[in-house]
Image: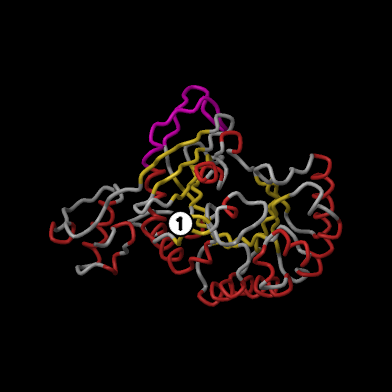
C-alpha cells in the first residue's frame, strides 16, 4: 500500500487536478471540491509516532524523536525564525548515519537504514501539526502580549540524522513533495540540503540542476586534518571536493555556503584560512560557523572565535556565525537518539 506522504500528483491514476485535491486534503489544506473515495481508500495515511520531545526554553528549539514502523529512530527539530510565528524544520534523511564524523552524535550511532520519502515528509507533517498553539516560557521574538506561537513552517533543511546525498533519490523526491503546492508548500529555494562532501553526488546534483540550496560541510580544508575528523574525506581529497563545489557553483550561480563546525584549538588557525583561499580563490562563498555540540570536542572561546572570524574576513566573503540551538535540552541534532541508544 502506497503512503500518501510519498506521492505526487503524477503518481495517481486520475486527473492531475483530482490528484492535487487528494493530496491537499491529506496535508490538511482546504479544498473546494470533494475527491473520489475509490482513489483515497487504497492509500496509507498513518503518521510517525512521536516518542519524545525536548524543548529548550532558552531559545524555543523543539527536538522530536520518532519511532518508525520497524522500530528505527529518526529525529527532527523545529527551529523558531526571526519572523514571529514562522519556523524552519530540520529533517533526518537516514536512521543513523554511515559517515562516522568524529564530532557528530549521529555519526557514532552508525547507519540503520535509509528513510523512505514518506518517512521524511511525515516528520515535517508531525512537527507542523504538533506545534499548533504551543506555549513557550521564553524565546526569540515572542510578542510581549502573548506566549502562543502559531506554527507556520516556511523552510526546511536536511541537516538532521544521516547524509542526505547518501540517500539521494529518496531525499530529492521528499524535497519535491515538500515544495509542491498541494503538499508541503515550502518554496524550493527555502529547502536546503547539506552534505559532508560526497563528490560524485555533488556532480550529479549539479548536472540535474536541482532548485534547492546546497550546503557543503568542510570543517577543515586541510586533507590530513579533514580525514581525521570526517572519515569520508579519505575517499576524496579537499581538491576533488573543491572541484565539485566549483562545478556546482557554475551550474547554480550565486554563492556556495560552506559549513564549518568550529572545534576549539583544532580548526581555527591561519593555516585553515590559507587552505580555503587556495582551494576556492575563484568560487564565491559564504561561510557559516557552527558551534560544536556534545562533549567530545570543546567549543572555541569567544577570543579564539573572534580571531578566526577576523582571519576569514581576509577572504572577502560573508562570514556568519550560525546559532546552534537546543543543546541545553538535548534538542540539537543527534542527541536524543544517541541517549536512547545508550
145 in the magenta segment: yes
Assign a secondary structure to mark 1: loop
Judging depth in this view, the residue of 287 and 334 nearest the camera is 334
Q: Residue 87: image x %, image y %?
A: 49, 43
Of 144 and 324, the residue lying toward us: 324
Q: Which residue is mark 1?
A: 187
Q: Is residue 123 magenta?
A: no
Q: In percent of the image, x 28 and y 50: which residue is there?
A: 46
Task: Measuring from the top left, give residue 122's x and y in whole percent.
Answer: 37, 51
Q: Position of residue 103 (x, y in %)?
A: 67, 51
Q: Residue furthest right?
A: 270
Above or below, 113 relative to 242 = above
Q: Residue at x 50, y 69 (%)?
A: 210
From what the image shows, is residue 160 above or below residue 81? below
Is 128 situated left or right of 198 in this image?
left
Tell me the magenta residue range.
Answer: 129-150
Amino acid at each position: 500500500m502506497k503512503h500518501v506522504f510519498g506521492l505526487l500528483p503524477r503518481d495517481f491514476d486520475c486527473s492531475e487536478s483530482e490528484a492535487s485535491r487528494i493530496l491537499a486534503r491529506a496535508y490538511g489544506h482546504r479544498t473546494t471540491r470533494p475527491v473520489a473515495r475509490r482513489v483515497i481508500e487504497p492509500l496509507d495515511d498513518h503518521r510517525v509516532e512521536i516518542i519524545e520531545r525536548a524543548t529548550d526554553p532558552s531559545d524555543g528549539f523543539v527536538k522530536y524523536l520518532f519511532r518508525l514502523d520497524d522500530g528505527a529512530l529518526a529525529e527532527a527539530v523545529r527551529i523558531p525564525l526571526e519572523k514571529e510565528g514562522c519556523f524552519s524544520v530540520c529533517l533526518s534523511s537516514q536512521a543513523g548515519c554511515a559517515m562516522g564524523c568524529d564530532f557528530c552524535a549521529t555519526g557514532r550511532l552508525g547507519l540503520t537504514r535509509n528513510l523512505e520519502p514518506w518517512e521524511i515528509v511525515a516528520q515535517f507533517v508531525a512537527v507542523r501539526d504538533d506545534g499548533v498553539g504551543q506555549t513557550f516560557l521564553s524565546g526569540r521574538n515572542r510578542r510581549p502580549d502573548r506566549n502562543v506561537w502559531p506554527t507556520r513552517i516556511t523552510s526546511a533543511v536536511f541537516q538532521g540524522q544521516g547524509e542526505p546525498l547518501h540517500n539521494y533519490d529518496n531525499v530529492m523526491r521528499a524535497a519535491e513533495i515538500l515544495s509542491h503546492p498541494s503538499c508541503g508548500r515550502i518554496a524550493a529555494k527555502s529547502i536546503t540540503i547539506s552534505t559532508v562532501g560526497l563528490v560524485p553526488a555533488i556532480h550529479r546534483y549539479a548536472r540535474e540542476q536541482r532548485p534547492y540550496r546546497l550546503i557543503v560541510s568542510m570543517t577543515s580544508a586541510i586533507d590530513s586534518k579533514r580525514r581525521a575528523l570526517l572519515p569520508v574525506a579519505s575517499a576524496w581529497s579537499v581538491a576533488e571536493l573543491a572541484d565539485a563545489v566549483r562545478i556546482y557553483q557554475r551550474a547554480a550561480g550565486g554563492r556556495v555556503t560552506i559549513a564549518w563546525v568550529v572545534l576549539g584549538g583544532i580548526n581555527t588557525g591561519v593555516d585553515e584560512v590559507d587552505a580555503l583561499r587556495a582551494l576556492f580563490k575563484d568560487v564565491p562563498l559564504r561561510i557559516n560557523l557552527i558551534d560544536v555540540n556534545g562533549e567530545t570536542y570543546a567549543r572555541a572561546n569567544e577570543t579564539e572565535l573572534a580571531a578566526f572570524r577576523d582571519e576569514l574576513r581576509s577572504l572577502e566573503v560573508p562570514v556568519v556565525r550560525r546559532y546552534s540551538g537546543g543543546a541545553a535540552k538535548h534538542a540539537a541534532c543527534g542527541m536524543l537518539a544517541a541517549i536512547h541508544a545508550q
